Amino acid sequence: MPKAITEKIVECRTPGGRTMRMERWYYEAIRAALLDILPEPGVCAELFELHKRVAASLDDFTRENIDSLSWQVAWVRLDLETEGLLQRDAALVTRL
């Protein structure tokens, strides 16, 4: 999980050591969507398609109220890579 800054803010990390702060509800909604799309080890999705599938899986309120959804998805995906739950190559993201 990302580092909690406050009850409402978390800090996402990248494998390269960069960090970005994000509202906790953004993080939790996107994380749940990513893990639903990639439910078990070995399941993979194309990187480009993953962003569309996350957007489609979120409810209307969440989708409309998350700023720069594709950017936020990328940060949560990178944080999950840092946790060792996902792995990516040039085109695919795989659940470990």
Image (cartoon, rainbow, N blue to C red):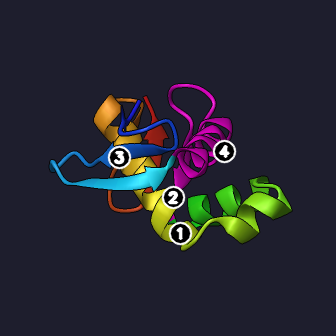
Question: Where does label 4 land, which residue?
Answer: 33
Q: Is residue 80 magenta?
A: no
Task: State which tag comes first along the sequence, 3 or 4.
Answer: 3
Nearer the viewer's eye, disc 2 or disc 3?
A: 3
Residue 68 in percent (x, y) is at 54, 74
Give the position of the N terminus as an image quadrant. top left
Say which of marks 3 and 1 sits in front: 3
What amino acid is labelled 4 in the image? Ala
The reply to whether the C-beta atoms of the residues labelled 1 and 2 are less than 8 Å apart is yes
Rounded to the nearest whole Å, what is the CA distance between mark 2 and mark 3?
11 Å
Q: Does the image show residue 87?
A: no
Q: Secondary structure at mark 2?
A: helix
| Mark closest to the chain's N terminus, 1 or 4 | 4
| Residue at image mark 1 | 70
Q: Quadrant of the C terminus?
A: top left
Instruction: Please say if 70 is above or below 79.
Output: below
Front tag of 3 and 4: 3
What secondary structure is marked by label 1?
helix
* Lower sequence index among marks 4 and 2: 4
Q: Is residue 44 magenta?
A: yes
| Magenta residues (range) | 24-47
- Crowding near pointer 3: few (<14 within 10 Å), some, many (20+)? many
Labelled disc at residue 56 = none
Kind of residue sitting beneath label 2: Val
Which mark identifies residue 12?
A: 3
**Could you say where residue 39 lies in the image, as x and y percent from the top left?**
63, 30
The residue positioned 82% from the left and 56% from the top of the image is 59
